[in-house]
Image (tube, helix red, strand yellow):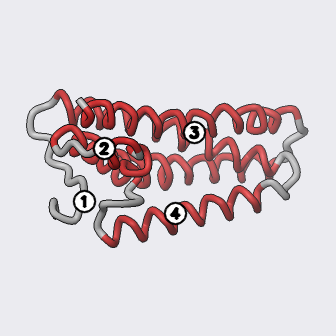
Amino acid sequence: MVGKLGAVWGIGGLVLLLGEAIYRLTPIAMATFDSRLDPLHWVALVVWVSAMLVLEGYRGFQKSFSPRAAARAKYLTEHPNVVRSLFAPFFCMGYFYATRAVKIRSILLTIGIVAMIVGVRQVDQPWRGIVDLGVVLGLTWGIVSIGVFTYLAFAAEGFDRSPETPRAT
């Protein structure tokens, strides 16, 4: 029971975290279109949104983070542990009880995200909105891919993604 609750909390916590960011950033992103956009803004918008969909959505979430997070949630059900279940969102993100490489990537990614947030807050519209629109779309892709991989991890036969725990690799 602890493991199942941990898995639900782990995935639910991730979705809540990403959903909250989408909720906060969407009005700023949509305010971009309240400004007069010149051709440079439109080119930047198309390039940035495309880059974020490929780099954040596809490569970051779909190819790496989401399958691992789902595998780690499944690991919680198969290896119940109160501490891992209590801190399940952080466990699913790979902050602890993970391979050294996963922990390092998770910490560096967090530092990079915080630095980007601080930097982007200093930028005026429409540039801030352009950046935030790409982030919102990438995070939305992330939530969808987390849902798909979580379904595959728990409902499909042969889900073979590693949770990248110290003993699983």
Marks 1/4: CA distance?
17 Å
Helix, strand or loop at disc 3? helix
The disc, 4 or 2, on the residue closer to the chain's N-terminal end is 2
Q: Residue at x 30, y 60 (%)?
A: 97
**For the point 20% across and 50% down, which residue is it?**
161
Foreground mark, 3 or 2, reads 2
Numbered badge on residue 109: 4
Residue topped by disc 1:
164
Asked whether, in this view, residue 74 is left or right of residue 63, the answer is left
In three-dimensional space, the C-alpha distance between marks 4 and 3, rounded to whole angstroms, equals 18 Å
Measure how far apart labels 4 and 2 are at the Cα level. 26 Å
Dot 1 or dot 4, earlier in sequence: 4
Amino acid tagged 2: Val
Q: Which mark is in front, 4 or 2?
A: 2
From the viewer's perspective, is residue 160 above or below residue 140?
below
Query: Label 4 sits on what residue type?
Result: Leu
SS state under label 1: loop
Measuring 61% from the left and 59% from the top, which residue is drawn there?
113
Q: Are marks 1 and 3 in contact (CB under 8 Å)?
A: no
Query: Where is residue 112 drawn, in percent x and y?
Result: 60, 65
Q: What residue did someone put label 2 on?
A: 82
- In the picture, measured across the screen, residue 69 lies left or right of residue 144, that is left
Indicate which label's residue lies in the foreground, 1 or 3: 1
For marks 3 and 2 on the same chain, the one whose residue lies earlier in the sequence: 2
Res 137 label: 3
Q: CA distance from mark 3 to mark 2?
A: 34 Å
Residue 6 figure quarter: top left
Q: Residue 157, percent across and down?
A: 9, 33
Q: Residues within 10 Å of mark 4 (few under 14, many from 20)?
A: few
Instruction: Please name the amino acid that badge 1 sits on.
Output: Glu
